[in-house]
Image (cartoon, rainbow, N blue to C red):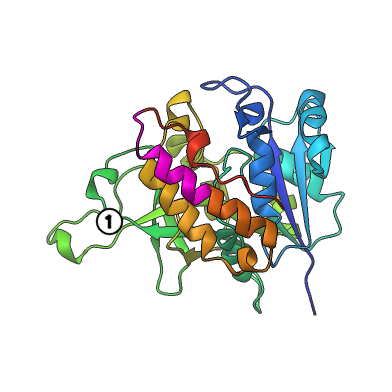
C-alpha cells in the first residue's frame, strides 16, 4: 500500500531578527520560493504546499507557481500551521520543512520520508548529523540528540550530550536537523498537547513528543541545513557556494533536466567569480534552480 506524502512549508510574515525574511529577495525570487522549489524535487513526496499567515506572502509567491494556502493568524507556531493544513490534506504522512531553508537538499527530505515508509510506521521521523567540530558542542543554537541502538531519539538538548566523563575520543555526538515527518494521527495529537515541562526548559518542542510517549526515528544524513535567521546569514563564503553547486550537479535530477544542466554551469561559473571578490553574499551562492 502506497502512503500519500504531503510536504507542508510554514511561512510567517513577521520575523524578529530579519524582518519579513520569507520575502527576502534571493536571485529574483522570495526566499520561501527557493525552499518550495527545492522541496518539489523530493522524489518521495506527492504534493508540496506553502502554509502562510498573510496575504502579502500569498501574493508574492503565487506568480512562481507555488501551491499556497492561507492559514489563520491566531496560530502560534509553524507546527500549528502544518497541523491546521494537514487536516485538509488527504495524506497519511506529513512533512514539515521550515520556510527559511532555501538551500535544503531534496535528498534530506527523501531521507526523512523513507523512515516513515516501513512497517510498523514510526510516530515521527527526523534527521541527525555527526558533529565533527567540537566547538559546536557548547553552542546552544546547535541542538544535540542521543539515540538508542535502533536509531530512536532518547533526548534532545542544547547542552552537550552525552557528557564525555572519561575519554572524549570514544564519544559520538549528533546534531539535530529540524525536518520532521509525522503520521497524520501523531501530528493531530501533537497539536493538541500542552507544552511539556522539558520542552519549556530547553525551548525544544520535539521534547513534547518524547515526554508524551511518542517515538522519534532519526536518520543519519551527510548533508547539512542552513536556515536564514539574520542578515548575517545572508553573507556566505564562495567556498560554500562552490560546494553547494557541486552537490546539485551530482544529482540525477540535474542530468535529466536540460534547463538545470545549463543553470548548474552558470552556478559553477558564478562560484569562480565569487572567489575573486571579498563581497560574497548569500545570493552569490544560491543556485537558481527551477522546479
Vertical arrangement, residue 267 with respect to residue 185, above or below: above
Is residue 104 something that shows in the picture?
Answer: no
**The magenta segment:** 267-278
> What residue is shown at x 42% (from left), y 62% (from top)?
222
Q: Is residue 253 above or below residue 275?
A: below
Q: Position of residue 211 (x, y in %)?
A: 53, 51
At 81% from the left and 34% from the top, the residue drawn is 71
In this view, the residue farthest toward the left is 166
- Relative placement, left or right, of 132 versus 226 is left
Instruction: Identify the residue at horizontal 39%, vertical 41% (top origin).
Output: 238
Query: Residue 141: x and y, percent?
Result: 39, 37
Mark 1 crowd level (few <14, some 14–19, many ≥20, 10 Å Cα): few
Magenta segment's dominant SS is helix
- Say whether residue 251 is visible: yes
Point out the image quarter for the N terminus.
bottom right
Indicate the position of residue 119 as horizontal and vertical percent values: 66, 79
Check residue 137 for magenta coloring. Answer: no
Q: Secondary structure at mark 1?
A: loop
Q: Is residue 63 left or right of residue 114?
A: right
Tag 1 residue: 132
* Nearer to me, 127 or 273: 273
Q: Nearer the viewer, residue 202 or 60?
A: 60
Could you say which quadrant of the image residue 135 lies in? top left
Tally the marks: 1
The structure residue drawn at horizontal position 54% and vertical position 54%, both measured from the top left corner, is 265
In this rendering, would 152 be left or right of 262? left
Q: Quadrant of residue 276?
A: top left
- Percent coordinates x, y for residue 261 in the rendering: 61, 59
Taking 170 as reference, is 19 above or below it? Answer: above
Which is more toward the observer, 23 or 182?
Answer: 23
Amino acid at each position: 500500500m502506497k502512503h500519500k506524502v504531503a510536504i507542508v512549508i510554514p511561512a510567517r510574515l513577521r520575523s524578529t531578527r530579519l524582518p519579513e525574511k520569507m520575502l527576502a529577495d534571493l536571485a529574483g525570487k522570495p526566499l520561501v520560493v527557493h525552499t518550495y522549489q527545492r522541496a518539489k524535487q523530493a522524489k518521495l513526496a506527492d504534493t508540496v504546499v506553502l502554509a502562510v499567515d498573510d496575504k502579502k506572502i500569498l501574493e508574492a509567491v503565487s506568480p512562481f507557481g507555488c501551491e499556497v494556502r492561507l492559514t489563520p493568524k491566531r496560530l502560534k507556531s509553524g507546527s500549528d500551521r502544518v497541523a491546521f493544513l494537514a487536516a485538509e490534506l488527504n495524506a497519511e504522512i506529513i512533512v514539515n520543512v521550515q520556510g527559511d531553508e532555501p538551500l535544503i537538499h531534496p535528498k534530506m527530505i527523501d531521507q526523512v520520508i523513507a523512515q516513515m515508509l516501513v512497517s510498523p510506521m514510526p510516530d515521527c521521523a527526523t534527521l541527525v548529523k555527526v558533529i565533527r567540530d567540537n566547538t559546536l558542542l557548547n553552542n546552544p543554537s546547535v541542538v544535540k540528540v542521543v539515540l538508542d541502538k535502533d536509531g530512536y531519539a532518547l533526548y534532545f538538548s542544547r547542552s552537550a550530550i552525552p557528557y564525555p566523563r572519561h575519554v572524549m575520543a570514544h564519544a559520538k555526538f549528533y546534531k539535530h536537523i529540524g525536518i520532521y515527518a509525522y503520521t497524520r494521527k501523531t501530528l493531530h495529537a501533537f497539536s493538541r498537547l500542552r507544552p511539556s515541562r522539558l520542552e519549556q526548559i530547553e525551548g525544544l518542542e520535539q521534547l513534547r513528543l518524547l515526554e508524551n510517549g511518542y517515538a522519534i526515528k532519526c536518520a543519519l544524513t551527510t548533508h547539512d541545513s542552513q536556515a536564514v535567521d539574520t542578515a548575517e546569514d545572508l553573507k556566505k563564503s564562495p567556498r560554500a557556494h562552490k560546494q553547494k553547486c557541486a552537490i546539485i550537479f551530482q544529482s540525477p535530477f540535474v542530468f535529466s533536466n536540460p534547463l538545470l544542466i545549463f543553470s548548474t554551469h552558470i552556478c559553477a561559473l558564478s562560484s569562480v567569480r565569487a572567489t575573486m571578490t571579498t563581497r560574497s553574499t548569500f545570493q552569490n551562492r544560491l543556485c537558481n534552480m527551477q522546479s
